[in-house]
Image (tube, coloured by chain):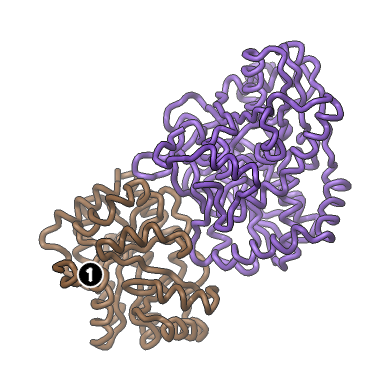
Amino acid sequence: MNAQAKVAPRDSISTAIRGAAASGRPALVGFTTGGFPDRDRFVRDLRAIAAAADVVEIGVPFSDPMADGATIQRASFASLKGGFTLPWLLGELEGMRPRPRVPLLLMSYLNPLLAYGLNRLPDAAAKAGVCGFIIPDLPYEESSEVRAALDRVGLALVQMVTPVTPAARLRMLCEASQGFVYAVTMTGTTGKSVAVPDEVLDYMDRVRVVSPVPVCAGFGIRTAEQVARMHGHVDGVVVGSALVEVLERGEDPTAFLRALAP
Amino acid sequence: MNIEALRIDREALLAQTLQGAFPDARGRFGPFGGRYVPETLVPALDRLEQGIREILPDPAFKAELDRQLRTWVGRPTPLTFASELSRRWGAEVWLKREDLAHTGAHKINNAIGQGLLAKRLGARRVVAETGAGQHGVATAAACARLGLPCTVYMGSIDMERQSPNVGRMKLLGAEVVPVTGGDQTLRAAIDEALRDWVADPDGTFYVLGSAVGPHPYPYLVREFQRVIGIEARAQMLAQAGALPDVVVACVGGGSNAIGLFHPFVGDLAVQLLGFEAGGTGPGLGQNAASLAYGTPGVLQGCYSLLLQDEHGQIQETHSVSAGLDYPGVGPEHALLASIGRLDFAAAEDGESLEALAECCRAEGILPAIESAHAFAGARKHAKRHPGCRILIGLSGRGDKDMPTLQRTLLKGTDR
């Protein structure tokens, strides 16, 4: 069948991450908040991030971002105040010409996705060029319905693992994850700067051993030193709050990202 | 209720409810409940669930909890016949006096229970959220009694309108952290407490005060609050000689209501009637009546009925009562309401304050503004059902509400 001959959108994520690793550097997953700082600048910033990142993760603002620290909370509330909605974001992405040249991921709390409708979401997201979802308040045990919906059109559901995830669960989550595994560097919310002690590198190694898909580290990645230290222990890094702060200050996201992984 | 899309099988779910099937193994109350949390919290909730299974039935734990409830909390709380309200309303009115429990509200039943559990599970510190401040005060008191460090998150709006409770928490040794993000009320305080817990899921125990949140919290809170209904049911039989025709409670997240209602769920002749915060009217943003006006969705760990817009963004709520000012409701209430076992309506700000004043003068009792919503509702019910026997959950006392009462009922009376 034609559909099977085509590459599933979710595979383009792992391909992009492995491509970066093949050229000798960790892949960069750049995060920005949808509709932030305003609707026009969001689209411009998205292009600028896509020029330097291997994958772009777009946060869907939610009124109760319980897994996020101060920066992303601030960006989410600002965007909602500016009138952000998920239908607007999907429409904007669908209309972008030229399309961003890197795979796009949506990071969303579950409720805005439920409100959009799990029956309509996969097709609309695929049409908008979205390759997968990260849903921080959807543990594996609650995910069967969402997973089945996304599977229908080949979209990834990325699982997160953390330093406190027990070994058996870690293996199960890695095997269930699609696109890549999001290895949270620390307990806590997004955005706090994190030193990279040996335990974190050991933990990344443990994740990588059991994961059939690439492993990207996220939460607290801010500096080239951190990225250099993680190199060889992960396939990529997610840069979120630090990048949103660059955008808040009106600085150039392309230059910031390029300086992280020269 | 806006639940057509869920295709609820009322008879089947009622039968399961009466068999005690909920929460099920997945933490569900029918379609509601579950566990929607960041991955970091999953092992902590698994440990909590395991701990509950082992510790709650343990005779030594039960004896210790019972001792604390009797000698420190002041249980059993009395059942009071409200003779003057009965005369005025043309009904037989009974009050379950949680206002007489230590720290002034039902919240202490759960706080001391979870505090003892935290100790048994080896917690190094406790965090809690609070809206009206009653759960914060109760948790601070329990932690002082048990020797646990305690941090309480409280919205900055609530800190102002419930300022007496902020001072009480500090005196009891708790650190009170103002929450200035989000809506600056109970919901933002829960978000912040969850963020704190995510940072240290192994050493920190989250004492959640409402019958909301991820499984097993709605179950745990219910188990520690059921003592209200168990006592009230026995007291009604002993003092009134019969069960009530209707049991009335205020419903925010729903902890006092589920505690009072649950032991009556199997008494099908007893009507259960919950009153939510009607605020200033039925419009979105004017109230906090999630059963009446909410739609299904996921907030703060559970699937329930929420006040949200068409895009799934949670809406700001309004209520004169900080303790009811929450855009969701416990999953078990959502189930009981959706199968018709729980009736509900809204009591607005104005009528609740009037009911508070009436209770003061008629019975010599100052109820919390939260509890006053139950009185406003009970009065309306009595007018429609002359002679009925009503049991009202008087969930807490109103001393904490003096700043709000000075601005409303007492306005202009101080000269």
Question: What amino acid is labelled 1 in the image?
Answer: Ala
Determine whether B412 is above or below B28 in the image: above
Residue B14, image x, y percentages: 58, 39
Please indicate whether residue B6 sits to the left or right of residue B150 in the image. Answer: left
Question: In the rendered image, is residue B261 in sight?
Answer: no
In the rendered image of this protein, does residue A212 appear above or below residue A96? below
Residue at image point 28% right, 53% down: A121
Q: Residues within 10 Å of mark 1 (few under 14, many from 20)?
A: some
Q: Nearer the viewer, residue B127 or B253?
A: B253
The residue at the point 43 percent across, 69 percent down is A160
Please state, as top left, top right, bottom left or bottom right, where the N terminus of chain A lies in the image. Answer: bottom left
What secondary structure is marked by label 1?
loop
Name the residue: 46% across, 49% down.
B298
B6 horizontally vs B300: left or right: left
On screen, residue B84 versus residue A117, left or right, reads right
Write down which chain is painted purple: B
Picture colour for chain A: brown
Residue nearer the viewer, B413 or A257: A257
- Residue identified by numbered label 1: A8
- Marks counted in the figure total 1
